[in-house]
Image: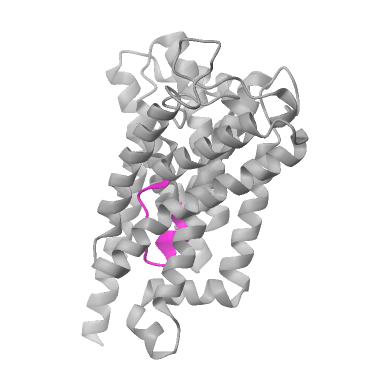
Amino acid sequence: MENRKKFLDIIWITLLTIAVGTILILLCGANPVEAYQRFFGGVFGNLNGFCEIFVKATPLIFTGLGCAVAFRTGFFNIGAEGQFYMGAIAAAVVSLNLTQIPGTIRILISVLAGFFCGGIWALLAAYMKSKFGISEIIVTIMLNYIAINFLGIAIRTFLMDPKGSVPQSARIERDAAFSYLMPPATLHAGIFLAVGAVILIWILMEKTKYGYEMKVVGMNKRGAKCNGISVMKNIVLSAFLSGGLAGIAGVVEVLAVQRKLLEGISSDCGYTAVLIALIAGNRPWGVLVASVAFAAMQVGANSMQRQLGIPSAIVSILVGFVVLLILGRNMFQKSLWKRKSREE
């Protein structure tokens, strides 16, 4: 019954989303049938378009996983964007300076450095929450701006390409970057790293003692304390893991997609990750599905925009609409549960 209910929820949310999308297309003065043809043609019509889905989904998987881990522990990490940037900076520093180290080892060091820097950036918010009682939402948002502007300083000073005049780093060497799987398509090996992260986080959260303790802390901090579970230890662990995953997203974007460090490198995927985690219900496999679905919508919407002039911003509207539906459904179910409890 529970699975059937979830399936029906997915069906009616999908139908409502399609209906709203159709209305938005009509408001743009386009034919919905033709628009949807262009949409699916952009997604499945050629190899490049199909591969682009997984290229766009990869950083969303990492940042979405990071937000999901933090949210399930009750640590509201809104700073995946800043953690993404710190991971990207770390990857550029390692790749451009450790040139005497073989490429494969340099990639591994870059991933570890990005994970560490992103994790430390999130730990700052966890420390300020535990030490001074400052909301992690405020701290992580402020840290986003610091990280973004620090990257701007870096690519104009110590990381700026000495041979150019544009604020960006030098290009990463090919042997120190993720390889393309099906050239000339830009699908890269980072997608395997992202799927591996999903599997590892699922095992951690669902099959280990640490995952169980983090979930208990997220559901009831007082109950966790009464059962001898350290609330602070689990919040710190989830914060570091959350920031580290977002940092790896920055590493992959630098070493696989852009192959250099530049401003605006994240395309706001750190903010989109919050929506991805909410849509996925903070579940690792849900994050994978939601990230791929969102990336497919982006690719299809870009195709509609190029061929019919329909703004690709429709995707952002529809994602926001889906989040509102999910939150509304949860609030409705909670109110029914409370009413039933009072009656009993």
Q: Give the colour scheme of this rendering.
A: one colour
Q: Is residue 203 visible?
A: yes
How many badges with numbers are in the image? 0
Identify the residue at image location x=24%, y=62%: 134
Residue 240: percent from left, percent from top: 48, 59
User: What stretch of residues is rendered in magenta?
Assistant: 67-80
- Image quadrant of residue 124? bottom left
Q: Is residue 277 magenta?
A: no
Please give left or right for residue 69 compared with residue 54 in the image. Answer: left
Q: Is residue 141 above or below residue 300?
A: below
Image quadrant occupied by the C terminus: bottom left
Q: Is residue 8 visible?
A: no
Residue 275: percent from left, percent from top: 39, 46
Please give left or right for residue 285 compared with residue 272 in the image. Answer: right
Identify the residue at image location x=34%, y=32%: 149
Q: Is residue 76 magenta?
A: yes
Identify the residue at image location x=38%, y=41%: 271
Identify the residue at image location x=45%, y=83%: 229
Residue 286: percent from left, percent from top: 53, 53
Q: Is residue 301 above or below residue 127?
A: above
- Front one among 243 and 160: 160
Residue 314: percent from left, percent from top: 35, 27
- Front one among 47 and 191: 191
Q: Is residue 191 above or below residue 235?
A: above
Q: Is residue 179 above or below residue 222?
A: above
